[in-house]
Image (cartoon, rainbow, N blue to C red):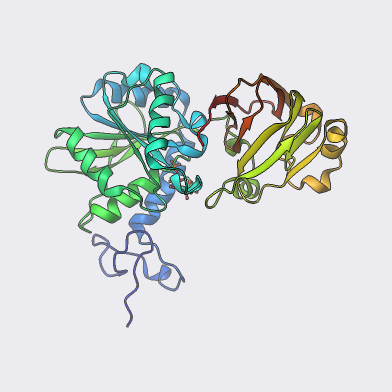
């Protein structure tokens, strides 16, 4: 019989012993792609864990981590850096050592130098008043820099426990799966342990006889686009691979639409350069501003609408651009690098979605 391996951890699939790696019940053996029970549980674990979590539970988790002498591994999403930060994290874990993993590097253009990205992430953290011990640029999906991460965790933890924190969707479970796949010796390492004072079960991975790595639940950022669309639209807006820059030159009476999900009006300024970084699915349309309302309401062309079905349901944010280029980030959807010195723009998004202006990433 040919050997079948779990597509999560690579263990040889077997259904004889529930306690050994690669176990699946016999009924699941006929599936085309098989995930062992351990990986299956892990993949569905975050969803289950996070759907029961209240904001109070979450604060309690952060406080408890803050009280421990441990290393905090803080995962953020490079594609929506600002939107993926944990609100109030430093208030609670300010005295802990923090190793930042800036994930989903594979979505950003390959040409971007790792060193530049790293410096940019550090500067952004500094603006938020956070000084991590170290920053590693990574991609859980592409297994990028995992040996470095593993070595740094071991170096910085000084024998202490490790707590992994991050909001929903930054890639925590993908990270944990990778760590297990790359570094567990295929013995069944995962255990669960209860988080004090809550009903939360945490995944605990023993690191040595005295210390473990704990996975903590995150909460959703309700101000990210990814939190307000249904599953079909989520697949549409989340880039599946490297984003391709789309370059537009705009005059000050022009607008661009990002499907029916967001719109930018260039209201004042000389000819400006707008480089858009979005999922390759995104339909980007340039139009005259005077025709933009009509285009939005003519539904068919823009394809995907999200929560706002008319311009009345969109909220406008105004920005004046400086001399240098800047990114306008539509949280969870993408960003636009704009060079339009002293230009003025209006960004339309559904109520509740965050829009940021920041130092340009690229
Ligand atoms: P969690 O909610 O923090 O546990 O995040 P998950 O690990 O479930 O990942 C959320 C989504 O991001 C999933 O669709 C993953 O496939 C995807 N994802 C995770 N890591 C990466 C990465 O490095 N690159 C890309 N492109 N997607 C990733």
Asked if 198 appears above or below 23 in the picture, the reply is above
Q: Position of residue 114 (x, y in %)?
A: 39, 42
Counting from the top left corner in percent of width and height, residue 361 is at 50, 34
Q: Quadrant of the N terminus?
A: bottom left
Above or below, comparing residue 255 to residue 56 in the picture: below
Q: Taking 343 as reference, is 17 left or right?
A: left
Q: Nearer the viewer, residue 190 or 282?
A: 282
Q: Residue at x 40, y 46 (%)?
A: 45
Nearer to me, 222 or 38: 222
Find residue 289 and report its image quarter.
Answer: top right
Residue 335 image-quadrant placement: top right
Which image quadrant is residue 134 in?
top left
Position above or below: 241 against 127: below
How far from the left and from the top, in percent, is residue 204? 26, 42
Count of labels in the image: 0
Residue 31 spot, x, y in % from top left:
46, 70
Which one is nearer the viewer's eye here, 22 or 302?
302
User: In the figure, is residue 189 to the left or right of 88?
Assistant: left
Return the residue nearer the eye: 51 or 239.
239
Q: Residue furthest left?
A: 209
């Amino acid at each position: 019989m040919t050997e079948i391996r779990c597509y999560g951890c690579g263990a040889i699939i077997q259904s004889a012993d529930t306690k050994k790696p690669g176990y699946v019940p016999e009924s699941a053996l006929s599936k085309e792609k098989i995930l062992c029970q351990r990986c299956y549980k892990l993949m569905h674990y975050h969803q289950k864990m996070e759907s029961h979590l209240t904001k109070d539970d979450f604060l309690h988790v952060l406080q408890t981590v803050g009280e421990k002498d441990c290393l905090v591994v803080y995962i953020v999403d490079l594609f929506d850096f600002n939107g993926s930060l944990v609100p109030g994290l430093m208030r609670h874990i300010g005295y802990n050592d923090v190793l930042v993993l800036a994930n989903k590097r594979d979505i950003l253009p390959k040409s971007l130098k790792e060193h530049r990205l790293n410096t940019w992430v550090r500067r952004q953290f500094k603006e938020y008043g956070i000084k991590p011990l170290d920053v590693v640029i990574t991609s859980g999906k592409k297994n990028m820099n995992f040996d470095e991460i593993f070595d740094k965790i071991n170096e910085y933890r000084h024998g202490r426990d490790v707590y992994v924190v991050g909001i929903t969707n930054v890639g925590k479970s993908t990270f944990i799966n990778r760590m297990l796949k790359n570094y567990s010796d295929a013995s069944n390492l995962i255990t669960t342990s209860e988080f004090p004072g809550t009903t939360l079960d945490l995944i605990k991975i023993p690191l040595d006889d005295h210390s473990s790595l704990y996975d903590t639940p995150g909460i959703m950022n309700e101000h990210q686009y990814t939190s307000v669309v249904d599953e079909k639209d989520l697949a549409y807006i989340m880039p599946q691979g490297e984003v391709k820059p789309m370059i537009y030159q705009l005059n000050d009476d022009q607008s661009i639409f990002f499907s029916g999900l967001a719109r930018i009006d260039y209201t004042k300024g000389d000819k400006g350069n707008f480089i858009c970084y979005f999922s390759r699915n995104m339909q980007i349309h340039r139009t005259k501003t005077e025709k933009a309302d009509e285009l939005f309401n003519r539904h068919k062309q823009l394809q995907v609408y999200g929560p706002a079905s008319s311009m009345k349901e969109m909220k406008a944010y105004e920005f004046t651009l400086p001399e240098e280029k800047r990114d306008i980030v539509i949280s969870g959807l993408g960003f636009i690098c704009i060079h339009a010195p002293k230009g003025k723009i209006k960004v339309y998004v559904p109520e509740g979605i965050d829009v940021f202006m920041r130092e340009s990433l690229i």
